[in-house]
Amino acid sequence: MFKADGQFLAGILLAFMCTTMGQAPPGGKPTGGGGGTQACTNPTCSSPPCIASRLGDVGCTTVDGVETISHEMKAKGATISSNAHIYGAFEAGFSEQQKSIIEGWGCTDASVVYDTQGGLDISIAEKKVAHACNVELPRVVGNNYIGIVGLCGGHTKDYHFHRSLECLYTQTGGHSPAVGNVAQYKLFGKREDFANSKLPLLDARGAHFGPTPDSNGASVYHYHVQDSAPFTVGCVGPTADNKLVSVAACRALDSTNCDGVFVDVHIGPNTIVKYDRFCPCFDANGSNSGINIVELPALSTTKISCTVSGTCANNTNNPSSSTPIQDGQKSQSGSQSGIISASATWTPLGTLLLMMSRAITTF
Ligand SMILES: [Zn+2]
Ligand SMILES: [Zn+2]
């Protein structure tokens, strides 16, 4: 349904009580709350493809990392231990429970971003909050990273990643190392070939076929972290016949969440994005609306990675189709719409704003 502006201002925004609201959207699973820390549970998917949890674990990390700049309760230098939760792109809504957190982002009236429905991805959620509160998100203030998630892509006391995971691996060499497990698949860092500046071409699930550092040259279906939604995992596994997943196939699998019911998300004075809450199937323009889908480049090529300028590399045994990619066609990250792309840029500021003053146990 389309929200009128009045409703927008009253009911707005997004995201955030991932684990404690006890309110699961279609396809999501309730993940009890209380603000404590809970062990990560890697989901199983015995007969791929499987719908991924919208508000809970889509996978678990397999390596430790160190937070490089303070965010919420994680101080600079704090360890993020292995077996941390990996969530998908979405947050579950905002309410008064997050008032102090929202104020910590610089919102003078937190209520303008309350939204009990949730289901916006972290990136568009930040854009919506930034617009509604007239602040920059994310940003660095003094020694603190101000954003819905930290620089490493996670948040809350029961720490869970939504994106980035960049503090779990070093950007060096060729294919990024593995950072987590997603059912029987692995999630790797964002690079297909760091030395040659190539990003992977990914399907609508966030994965592709290709050799990995530990596959002994075999082409295997594996996930990559990406800068645009779904950031980690859209759904689990390739198609039933072991192919890359198109946007349409992704939507068909997850038709409960990708139901064509839109909300108008205001992210700028004259910029409104039609958004399908909790739908994890994003097209080449970064849209999850299902309207005029622009298929992902990965679905029409044997190439598995490209530079942003369109220099691509082959996979000799990619089980997808064989149409060559066009010169200049961008890699998946480079091709995403600026409107929804994750934009991990942040600007150091010289002044300190009021920081969150209480322990963060939810969202
Ligand atoms: Zn979260
Ligand atoms: Zn790869």
Image: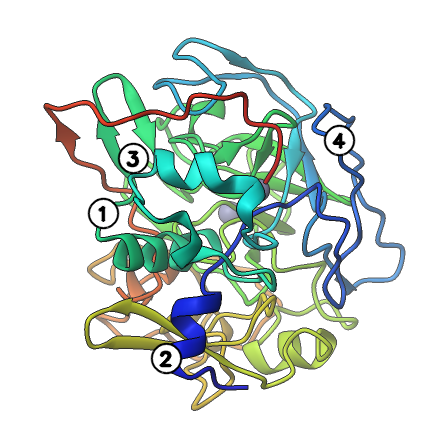
Residue 110 lies, in percent from the top left, at 40, 48
* Label placed on residue 195: 3
Q: Residue furthest bottom?
A: 292
Looking at the rendered structure, the secondary structure element under dot 2 is: helix
Looking at the rendered structure, the secondary structure element under dot 1 is: loop
The Cα atoms of the two marked residues, 4 and 2, are separated by 34 Å
| Residue type, mark 1 in image | Val
Q: Residue furthest top?
A: 77
For disc 1, the marked residue is: 135
The Cα atoms of the two marked residues, 4 and 1, are separated by 30 Å
Queried on whether the Cβ of the residue with tag 3 lies below 8 angstroms from ligand 2, the answer reads no
Q: Residue at x 60, y 60 (%)?
A: 116
Residue 84 lies, in percent from the top left, at 66, 27
| Residue type, mark 4 in image | Gly
Mark nearest the camera among 4 and 2 is: 2
The Cα atoms of the two marked residues, 1 and 2, are separated by 20 Å
For disc 4, the marked residue is: 34
Check disc 2: other Cα within 10 Å, few if <14, some if 14-19, many if 20+: few
